[in-house]
Amino acid sequence: MPFYDPPGDGISVCLNRWVVSWMLPFMKILVSACACLLGWSGCLAAEVRLERVPEKGLQPQVARGPDGTVHLVCLTGNPSASEVLYRSRKVGGEWSSAVTVNHLPHTAVAMGTIRGSQIAVGPEGTVHVVWNGPGANGVPASLFYTRLSCGAVDGFEPQRDLRGNTRALDGGASVATDAAGGVFILWHGSLPESPPGEDQRRIFLARSVDQGRTFGAVEEVQAGVSGVCACCSLKAFVAPSGEWLALYRAARRVDQRDVTLLRSRDGGRTFESSTVGPWALGACPMSSMALAGSGAATRGVWEAEGLIATALFGSGTTPAPLTLGPGRHPALAVNRRGETLVSWSEGTGWQRGGQLRWRLLDASGRPGEVTGSAPGMPAWGSSAVFVEGDDFVVLY
């Protein structure tokens, strides 16, 4: 059936829809590439598509595997006794059926939006997941870890508690992988002999050199350095250069809640720290943060003074953060052109939903004209972003 019929000469031009569906994305890429190479201001910006998390899942987290597959974890069920669900989506495909990650039921926590599951995918395709257990009646909250080996047919391995002798886990942990198949997990808590108080909290590390089969003894990051905001999660990332990075919220004084960057250039043996998001606050904001590779650098995003802030961490001095607007629980992704999409929640609170917001940064890191919002962010919800081609998909 023709859908283009030039008037006047009576000659119909019939183009098959499948041809057009192939040609239009190609033409868009070609025009955009030519415009960018020529320096035209009309260089086409990436498109943003919104998707709901399947089956009303909460707190989506995504990671891309070596073959381009997008891996997703989210929470479902009772907010205080949740399940962790996993799905995957190949390039151009649909989400797979859900697989339950936790073999012990009701051992995740959606309440608070900062203790949920985190995901990383190793270079061989193994999927690694960590999350905080609920803890109750004098039983410390657990640091649960499991993995799904590439090609495994029996699902995820039984979850393991990796917290060792640390206690008082609260804000969520994070997991990252390196190019050699190493896995490192960061969390914060207290030592058994430590007195109570946020100024006594420390950051701990569990590392594996065999793709998560085994982990060494729990290590203290920056031994002797204490003070971590209890109810804020942290985020770990391994840059393409092999550098380890992590963002967390410090609490070394009662009136200070600065976002702090940890960096290690020797595989996690030593770390240096710097303040990147100062905030004079005498309370815990229950916040989260995110990191993503951006060329040879790493872009971070976090909350400071009630605003979403972002900065690029390269080899030189970290520039002053750029603020994007009021909000909470940011996420980000960077496409091949160096554009960054940041998404976040706005208007959410304890047992209260709000709306989704997003903004596109151009390759130089400047906010562009692509911005937007959508209603319907659920209570205990947050968003995740991933790249398809050079466009972005936001899950919420």
Image (cartoon, rainbow, N blue to C red):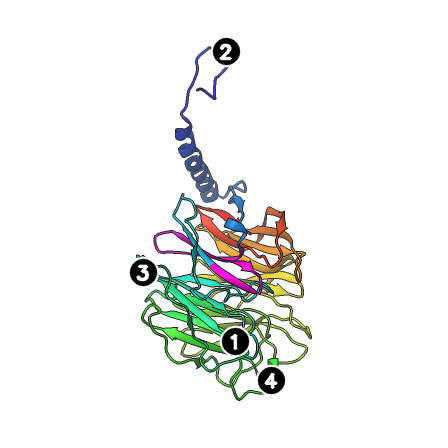
What residue appears at the point 52 percent right and 50 percent down from the top-left corner?
55
Q: Is residue 147 left or right of residue 262?
A: left
What residue appears at the point 39 percent right and 29 percent down from the top-left corner?
19
Q: Which residue is mark 2?
A: 8
Q: Is residue 169 above or below residue 128?
A: below
Residue nearest the observer in this picture, 157 or 289: 157
Residue 213 % position (x, y): 33, 70
- At label 3, counting other C-alpha atoms closer than 10 Å, the crowd grade (few under 14, some 14-19, many 20 or more) is some
Q: Which residues are magenta?
A: 58-84
What residue appears at the point 51 percent right and 41 percent down from the top-left corner?
44
Q: Which residue is mark 1?
A: 188
Residue 80 falls inside the magenta stretch = yes
What kind of residue is marked 1? His
> Closer to us: mark 2 or mark 1?
1
What kind of residue is marked 3? Glu
**Mark 2 or mark 1, which has the lower sequence index?**
2
**Mark 4 or mark 1, which has the lower sequence index?**
1
Tag 4 secondary structure: loop
- Pointers 2 and 1 in contact (CB under 8 A)? no
**Mark 3 or mark 4, which has the lower sequence index?**
3
Q: CA distance from mark 2 to mark 3?
A: 60 Å
Tag 3 secondary structure: loop
Where residue 196 is drawn, which disc sits there? 4
**Mark 2 or mark 3, which has the lower sequence index?**
2
Q: Which residue is mark 3?
A: 124
**Mark 4 or mark 2, which has the lower sequence index?**
2
